[in-house]
Image (cartoon, rainbow, N blue to C red):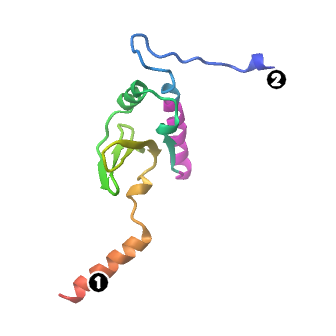
């Protein structure tokens, strides 16, 4: 197969939106594939937005396209982490901040429930011990 036979699709940012690079729209296609994989296999995945050549305008565009969902989770551990469901269930916008409030990383996670929210089995075991102590004092 020659290189001329490989289809090339150029995605250009909408006119009138300075700062868009055209790097965000392909992420929507990638997310669709990841959601399909989640439904078919249960496999979760993530896209590290901090590692991609995206401008703040690209991130705003992507955030707007994905919309806001019904669930928002805030964690406090060496800074604040927010996990916001998008308008597309199974797609979560995850932002980690340091203790000063500066964004340290951003991810889009495709999962039924983000891994960061799931309780670790050892923590659940400690919780059970505490619950049993409470019951024994009744």
Given the current orientation, which residue lies at the most extreme front position? 100
Instruction: Give the magenta part as a residue range.
Output: 27-43
Q: Secondary structure at mark 1?
A: helix
Indicate which disc, 2 or 1, sits on the residue closer to the N terminus: 2
Is 24 above or below relative to 18?
A: below
For mark 2, does the 10 Å Cα neighbourhood hold few (<14), some (14 to 19), or many (20 or more) residues?
few
Residue at image location 42% in from the left, 73% down from the top: 122
Residue ID for mark 1? 132
Chief secondary structure of the magenta span?
A: helix
Residue at image location 47% in from the left, 38% down from the top: 50
The quarter of the picture where the N terminus appears is top right
Q: Position of residue 133 (x, y in %)?
A: 26, 85
Q: Position of residue 70 (x, y in %)?
A: 29, 43
Given the current orientation, which residue lies at the most extreme right position? 1
Q: Is residue 62 visible?
A: yes
Residue ID for mark 2? 1
Q: Position of residue 126 (x, y in %)?
A: 36, 77
């Amino acid at each position: 197969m020659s290189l001329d036979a490989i289809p090339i699709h150029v995605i250009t940012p909408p006119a009138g939106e300075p700062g868009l690079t055209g790097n965000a729209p392909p992420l929507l296609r990638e997310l669709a594939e990841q959601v399909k994989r989640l439904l078919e296999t249960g496999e979760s995945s993530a896209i590290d937005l901090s590692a991609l050549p995206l401008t703040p305008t690209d991130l705003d565009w992507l955030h707007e396209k994905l919309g806001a969902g019904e669930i928002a989770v805030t964690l406090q551990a060496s800074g604040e982490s927010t996990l916001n469901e998008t308008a597309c269930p199974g797609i979560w916008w995850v932002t980690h901040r340091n203790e000063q409030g500066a964004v340290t990383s951003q991810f889009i996670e495709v999962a039924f429930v983000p891994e960061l929210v799931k309780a670790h089995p050892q923590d659940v075991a400690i919780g059970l011990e505490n619950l049993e102590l409470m019951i024994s004092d009744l």
